[in-house]
């Protein structure tokens, strides 16, 4: 852990010492105290700082929640350096998580605060969460839709998704990933790309689970805007309806109306077209007919 600090410049160490002083002592006057120890054993000072923050949000059993300050940090630093106490595994884990991700103490405090408020580990029970128990890296989410989207992550106890160092709550990540799939569904895509097709297929299955009750959905699909009806009719005249089905459905979550085009013979390809630009682009791609859209249906349309 110490080697992480070896390439640090004097200015970088001073900035970190100032952070320690302001964070744990609410003053800038203790910079020298922390700078001295950073030059001696920066790794143990880091673990001691993490220890103070973790115990602030997850106190020892029988202790009330209270913000631990500089006195606690220096006390734990001495105990670790002098080998009077072995640092708890959870402190080492969070300290390593910060260093490996290049993250700040602000990141750690935010994660701990949310975990204490919303996580399954109750602060007064003495159990402290580990990073891998509440944070999942995006590389492990190939089955995101198949596992139930955001609700699936929350059921598994995850409170954050790590996307290349940017952290999302499960609900925010679901919106991010849904927007990415919607972008794919709004234009031609390569059906031979197994990864893309699997993402689309699992997303559409998940979307079915998000549908409103039939009566509510029917109400929202009644009395459609005239331009939308015209586009559905125009598409029906220009594509092979024996091969494709055309309809209007509600996008999951947003409940926005989209035109859905599906290949009939197999699961095949599916498109969700949300506006006039996407419709015209799809017609331009469609290989079996020319795009000839009468003026009366070329008006702007918002689905």
Image (spheres, grey):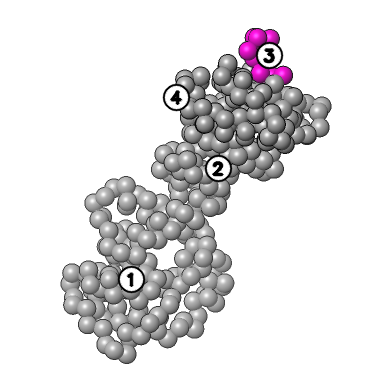
Q: Is residue 47 visible?
A: no
Question: Is mark 2 in CB contact (under 8 Å) with mark 3?
Answer: no
Task: Indicate the quadrant where residue 73 lies.
Answer: top right
Residue tagged 3: 79
Residue tagged 1: 278
Q: CA distance from mark 4 to mark 3?
A: 26 Å
| Residue 163 located within the stretch drawn in magenta | no
Q: Classify 10 Å Cα crowding around label 2: few (below 14), some (14-19), many (20 and above).
A: many
Label 2 sits on a secondary structure element that is: strand
Residue at x-position 30% and y-position 64%: 187
Residue tagged 4: 7
Label 3 sits on a secondary structure element that is: helix
Q: CA distance from mark 1 to mark 3?
A: 64 Å
Label 4 sits on a secondary structure element that is: loop
Classify 90 as above or below 103: above
Bounds of the magenta segment = 75-86
- Closer to the chain start, of discs 2 and 1, is 2
Classify 40 as above or below 223: above
- Closer to the chain start, of discs 4 and 2, is 4
Residue tagged 2: 160
- Closer to the chain start, of discs 4 and 3, is 4
| Residue 81 located within the stretch drawn in magenta | yes
- Closer to the chain start, of discs 4 and 1, is 4
Q: Residue 159's spot in the image, x, y percent? A: 58, 42
């Amino acid at each position: 852990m110490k080697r992480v600090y070896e390439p640090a410049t004097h200015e970088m160490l001073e900035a970190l010492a100032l952070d320690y002083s302001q964070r744990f002592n609410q003053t800038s006057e203790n910079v020298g105290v922390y700078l001295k120890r950073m030059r001696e054993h920066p790794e143990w000072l880091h673990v001691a700082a993490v220890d103070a923050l973790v115990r602030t949000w997850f106190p020892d059993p029988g202790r009330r929640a209270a913000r631990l300050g500089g006195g606690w940090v220096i006390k734990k630093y001495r105990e670790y350096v002098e080998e009077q106490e072995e640092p708890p595994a959870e402190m080492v884990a969070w300290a390593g998580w910060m260093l490996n991700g290049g993250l700040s103490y602000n990141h750690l405090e935010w994660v701990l605060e949310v975990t204490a408020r919303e996580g399954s580990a109750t602060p007064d029970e003495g159990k402290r969460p580990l990073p891998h128990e509440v944070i999942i890296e995006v590389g492990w989410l190939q089955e995101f839709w198949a596992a139930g989207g955001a609700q699936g992550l929350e059921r598994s106890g995850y409170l954050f998704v790590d996307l290349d160092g940017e952290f999302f709550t499960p609900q925010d990540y679901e919106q991010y990933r849904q927007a990415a799939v919607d972008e794919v569904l709004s234009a031609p895509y390569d059906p031979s790309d197994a990864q893309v097709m699997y993402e689309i297929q699992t997303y559409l299955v998940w979307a079915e689970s998000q549908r409103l009750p039939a009566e509510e959905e029917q109400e929202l699909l009644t009395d459609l805007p005239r331009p939308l009806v015209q586009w559905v009719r125009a598409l029906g005249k220009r594509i092979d309806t024996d091969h494709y089905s055309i309809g209007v459905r509600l996008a999951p979550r947003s409940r926005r109306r989209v035109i859905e085009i599906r290949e009939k013979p197999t699961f095949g390809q599916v498109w969700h077209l949300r506006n006039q630009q996407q419709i015209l682009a799809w017609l331009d791609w469609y290989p079996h007919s020319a795009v000839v859209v009468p003026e009366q249906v070329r008006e702007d349309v918002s689905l």
